[in-house]
Image (tube, rainbow, N blue to C red):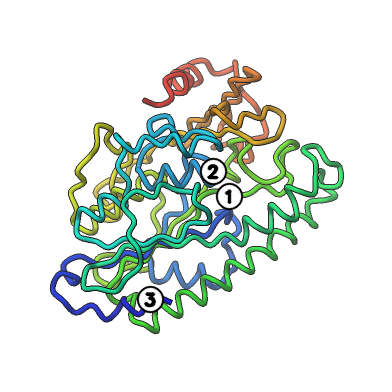
Amino acid sequence: MVFGWFGKKKAEAAKAKPNVIMVLIDMVRADRRQGRRIFEELAKRSVAFPQMYTHAPYTIASVHAFMSGMYGSLTGVDAYMNAPKFDKENCKTLAQHMKEGGYRCVADFMNEKIGPHQGFDEVRADDSPHFMYLHFSYVHREIVTNVIKVYKDDDPRYFGDENRPMNEQRYASYLDLAEEYMTGLLAHLDACGATKDSIVIFMTDHGCGVGERIGEKAYGIYAYDYTINTWAYFMHPELLPSGKEIPNMVRTIDIAPTILDLCRIDPIEGSKEMQGRSLVPVIRGDDRDDREVYVETAGLDGPTPSPTEANVFCVRNRNWKLIYNSTSKVRELYDLTSDPSESHNLAGQKPDIEGPLFEKIRRRYL
């Protein structure tokens, strides 16, 4: 374990810039946190963002987006196969900004293609403040092994109301693994003093379906809220309040600029600037506006697979969501106020709402 570094940093440089520990718990639905003790504990000690939304409902594009603060249409990582296309010449990563700010950066990616490597160093203990990224992938592993590889896209053994209890129970058992890990990790961080001088962030990259929509066994195929609604908890005993829940809609691309803001690092941008904005004004209460969400996905399977380019697009605000599939040319418009389950497609019935949202999709929110 390398956490012995944290809590022992008494040098003035480390005090001036807090250590950062970023923990991603892969594929934990926002609406499945209730009743779990670890989330109740985090809520007491953190600033919670339950209305955070991912840019992509699958890990590769999601991680590249929140590590760069940019959408995939800007970075080039807008499909499963496009991680090698990350525009590293013009898009700077959070780790690169942190390194330029005097941090030693360490990452534990699930695999080498999951996120951008630029800016991360080898692990070593020194007096520099540290930025550490950890990725817990067990939920993902179990879903791939026991759902994605077992069932077909329209499998009657998986989809349908009669199978939902089994699907829910299976998924809950995988969340038990995540809760065990999070509980042990937080206890270890407390024991070694890391939570006294570090910004600790627990978050997820995307959610997971349990058979709600035929064609999506788990994630990455569609853009409904059960996969795009995420969450994050930001913890620091001095820099951040405890027990505060933020009702605003925010985005995972806002995470990187928030960390830089808290660490007092002015990002030196590449030719492409971050599209995300710091959440510090939101935490202070100076910014009470919702941030409109833009989502892209490119399924490996499902009814319209497109592993090399995004073909499902979504713009979501507090009241409305428009989804567009460029392969099937199908639009879906939902009134989220009266229809939070996204059951009644109003496409073609509200042109004054649908038109401006579709224009944003057409421009890929650039």
- Residue 355 lies left or right of residue 156; in this view the side is left
> Which disc number belongs to residue 3?
3
Sequence order check, earlier mark of 2 and 3: 3
Image location of residue 308, percent across then percent down: 56, 29
Residue 233 visible (yes or no): no
Q: Quadrant of the N terminus?
A: bottom left
- Residue 159 lies left or right of residue 31; in this view the side is right
Give yes or no for contact between labels 1 and 2 (Cβ–Cβ under 8 Å). Answer: yes
At 24% from the left and 58% from the top, the residue drawn is 262
Q: Amino acid at mark 1?
A: Gly
How many angstroms separate mark 3 from mark 1 (CA)? Answer: 28 Å
How many angstroms separate mark 1 from mark 2 (CA)? Answer: 6 Å
Sequence order check, earlier mark of 3 and 1: 3
- Name the residue beneath numbered marker 1: 207
- Residue 196 lies left or right of residue 299; in this view the side is left
- Name the residue beneath numbered marker 2: 228
Can you say whether 104 is above or below 270 in the image? below
Q: Residue furthest bottom?
A: 191
Query: How many tags in the picture?
Result: 3
Choose between 344 and 252: the one closer to the eye.
252
Residue count near mark 2 (Cα–Cα under 10 Å), binned few <14, some 14–19, many ≥20: many
Residue 127 occupies which quadrant of the picture? bottom left
Mark 2 vs mark 3: in front:
3
Q: Secondary structure at mark 2?
A: helix
How many angstroms separate mark 2 from mark 3 (CA)? Answer: 31 Å
Image location of residue 213, percent across then percent down: 72, 38
